[in-house]
Amino acid sequence: MGRGAIKEKVRFYTEMVKLGTVASITVGGGGVSLLLNLDSGLKAILFLLSILLALSSVAFTVSSFLKSLDYMRELERLNEGGE
């Protein structure tokens, strides 16, 4: 894989980290709002679903971050002259 392709993958995964972070914050805020106003069964169910979605988006963010680090290391290795 060439340097250009690796750079594009780093950009892609960096954008995924940004997207995952925004999703985590947004869903987390909605979950806190539901938690502070639990007055029906439906809101309790939605709160539990928001916890699952927040955890999923955090896992997605961490996975994307680690993948971008892998590609950055690969790019660094190529820039040092190693093939």
Image (cartoon, rainbow, N blue to C red):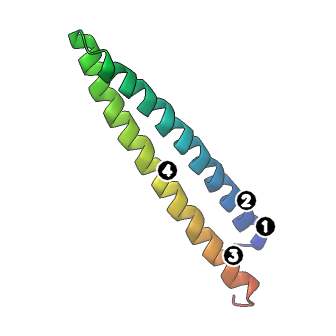
Could you give the CA–CA distance between mark 1 and mark 4, rounded to whole angstroms?
23 Å
Q: Check whether the beta carbons of the residues at disc 1 and disc 4 lie within 8 A of each other.
A: no
Residue type at mark 3 is Leu
Q: Are there few (<14), some (14-19), or many (20+) residues within 10 Å of tag 2?
A: few
**Residue 69 place in picture, x, y as percent:** 57, 68
Q: Quadrant of residue 53?
A: top left
- Seen at 70% across and 56% down, the residue is 11
Could you give the CA–CA distance between mark 2 and mark 4, rounded to whole angstroms?
18 Å
Of 39 and 80, the residue lying toward us: 39
On the image, numbered disc 4 is attached to which residue?
A: 61
Could you give the CA–CA distance between mark 1 and mark 3, rounded to whole angstroms?
9 Å
Q: Tell me which numbered mark, 3 or 2, is placed earlier along the sequence.
A: 2
Q: Tell me which numbered mark, 1 or 4, is placed earlier along the sequence.
A: 1
For residue 4, the mark is 1
For residue 75, the mark is 3
Q: Are there few (<14), some (14-19), or many (20+) residues within 10 Å of tag 3?
A: many
Q: Tell me which numbered mark, 4 or 3, is placed earlier along the sequence.
A: 4
- Seen at 24% across and 10% down, the residue is 39
Could you give the CA–CA distance between mark 1 and mark 2, rounded to whole angstroms?
6 Å
For residue 8, the mark is 2
- Seen at 53% across and 55% down, the residue is 64
Q: Quadrant of residue 70?
A: bottom right
Could you give the CA–CA distance between mark 4 and mark 3, rounded to whole angstroms?
21 Å
Of 57 and 74, the residue lying toward us: 57
Give the residue furthest to the left: 41
Q: Are there few (<14), some (14-19), or many (20+) residues within 10 Å of tag 1?
A: few
User: Tag 4's secondary structure?
Assistant: helix
Q: Check whether the beta carbons of the residues at disc 1 and disc 2 lie within 8 A of each other.
A: yes
